[in-house]
Every structure is written in structure tokens, then in C-alpha cells.
Amino acid sequence: MARILIAGCGDVGTTLGQMLHTTGHQVWGLKRDPAGLLPSGIHTIVADLTNPKTLTTLPPDLDFVVYSAAAAGFSEAHYQAAYVTGVSYLLEALRQTGQQPKRLLFTSSTSVYAQHQGERVDENSPAEAEGFNGRCIRQGEQRMWTSGWPAVAVRFGGIYGPGRTRLIDSVRDGTATCPEGPPVYTNRIHRDDCARVLEHLLQQSEPEKLYIAVDDDPAPLNEILDWLASQLRVPKPRRVMQPPSKPGAETRRDPAMRMRASKRCCNTRLRATGFQFRYPSYQNGYAALLEGSRQKANPAPDA
């Protein structure tokens, strides 16, 4: 039984913590918001990763630390706090308390890549995104890798799943649009597979220091939106011309960001470890979400 700290225990971290508890590990989840305790089986630590005074009571003798904090907003200050300041303070707290973890895991993002013309991307591709989000996340990776402890960064694609249904909702309410022109490739992974990837890498004896975690299907955005429309039985999203990409665009809501994000990420290294996806394509994952929504809307009658 391992002793595991999940720092930044949000949606993915909580799902991971429940998996680890079920398999017999002792799990602590660190979160900033004292409202709402974590599920049974995860010991709650209320602390702020950007305030070192709150990090003095970490559990002793940790075997593994998973850093899964997310930025509280889409601004440079928020990303600096989550991926640079928070990492630095947690690493220092581990040193101050004499911890000797066997491995650190860092939840990173494919946003560190600047490729945006449909290129294929793997772990050997240059990660030179100019936006503040990619820069800050890369700094967090480097601080983990130079911490003195074995560290693995996992670059996740766009995460979807329960409670993450923005794309479905936009197709359903008719606000989604499809970009005209060359395919805009997107990379996704279901929330449950995110947690399963982290659990899987904790079990590896000699993992690589970097993995891309996306499903098997880097699909064009138009294809996904049209497929969702057919499943929801609503009109296909309208086609619109996209403005030319703008280097340094700093908002997700800028349509140009979609163009800059067009790349095809490869999960071959992760697959080579023996990992098997529960949802290997967007069709598998979104179909499960849609079925879950139907069951909630039409519950079975009591027997």
C-alpha cells in the first residue's frame, strides 16, 4: 500500500483518488476550498499551493506526489500561480519536511506545442508555444524535472466527461460553429481515462519522463460537431470563415486560437506501456455521456 498525495485535488484528482483508494492505497487530497469535503477514502488537506504557510502539515513518508492543480482563470497571473508558484512552493515544502517520494507526476497540457497546421506531434516534437499558458506549464514541467526526485509530466489533450459538456451543449443550443477551410484537428481524452493514465504511470517501474495523453482519434472539429448533431438530432452547426491566426493570441474565446491549436498528437509512447483506453475515440466517450444524459432525463420506473 502506497501513501499518495494529490495536490490540487479537483475533478481528475478526485477520480484518481477514488481509484487509488479502491485498490488499497492511502490517499490525501490537497485542495484550497474548505467547502465540500472529498469523497470517503480520500483524506482532505485544506491548503493553498500559493501560500507556503499552509503547506507545513503534509503527511509524512509520502511514496508518490501527483500535482494536478489547474489555473483558476485564463490569465497569465492565474497560470503563473498554478503551474510555477504552486509547484515551487510544494517542492520546497516536501524538502522542508524531509520527504523522499519515489516519483512525482505533473499534469501538463498539449497547449505547450505551438504547431497549428495539422502537424503530427509526439514527445520529441518542439514545445515552443508563445502563449502565456504554454510558457507557464513548461516552466512547471522543468521545475518538476529538476527537483532532484524522479518526475513524469503527462501532457493531456482537451479533457471532456461528466460536467465537461460545453461542446455538446453548444451543438444542442445551436451556438456551435464549424470553421471553413483546412481541417482544424483537435485532441481529446475522457476524464476517466485521464485518471486511469495517472494510475497506470504510478505503477510503472521505469517510466519515461514525458508522455502525451490523448485518445487514438485526433479528429477534425467539423467532424466531431457534425457527429454530435446527428446524435442529438439537431441541425448541423453552420460553417463560418475563420480569421487568420494571430501569434500570441491570449484568449481561448478568440476564434483564431482554434486555428493555432490544429495539430495531431500521438499517444504511441503511452500505448507502448500497455495502457488501454476505455474511450479510445471521441465517439466512444461522447456516446457514453449522451447515454448518461438520456438516463437522467428518463429514469427507469421503480420495480
Image: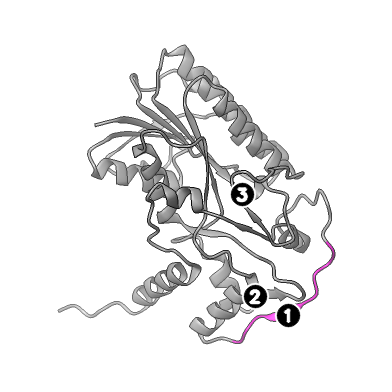
| Viewer-side residue, 266 vs 107 | 266
Q: Hey, what amino acid is under mark 3?
A: Thr
Residue located beneath label 3 in the image: 110
Please report whichever mark, 3 or 2, sits nearer to the chain's N-terminal start. Answer: 3
Q: Are marks 1 and 2 in contact (CB under 8 Å)?
A: yes
Give the crowd class for mark 1: few <14, some 14-19, many >=20 residues within 10 Å.
Answer: few
Please report whichever mark, 1 or 2, sits nearer to the chain's N-terminal start. Answer: 2
Q: Find the residue positioned furthest to the left.
A: 303
| Viewer-side residue, 22 vs 292 | 22
Residue 239 magenta-drawn? Answer: yes
Q: Of helix, strand and loop, which mostly describes the magenta segment?
A: loop
Residue located beneath label 2 in the image: 222
Tell me the number on the disc at residue 151: none
Q: Secondary structure at mark 2?
A: helix
Residue 253 lies left or right of residue 42; in this view the side is right
Q: Is residue 291 above or below residue 87?
A: below
Q: Position of residue 187 (x, y in %)?
A: 58, 60
- Residue drawn where x is 41% and y is 12% of the image: 98
Q: CA distance from mark 1 to mark 2?
A: 9 Å
Q: Which quadrant of the rendered structure holds the C terminus? A: bottom left
Which quadrant of the view contains residue 2?
Answer: top left
- Residue drawn where x is 38% and y is 77% of the image: 294
Q: Which quadrant of the rendered structure holds the N terminus? A: top left
Residue 78 lies left or right of residue 8; in this view the side is right
Residue located beneath label 1 in the image: 239
- Residue drawn where x is 54% and y is 60% of the image: 188
Q: Secondary structure at mark 1?
A: strand
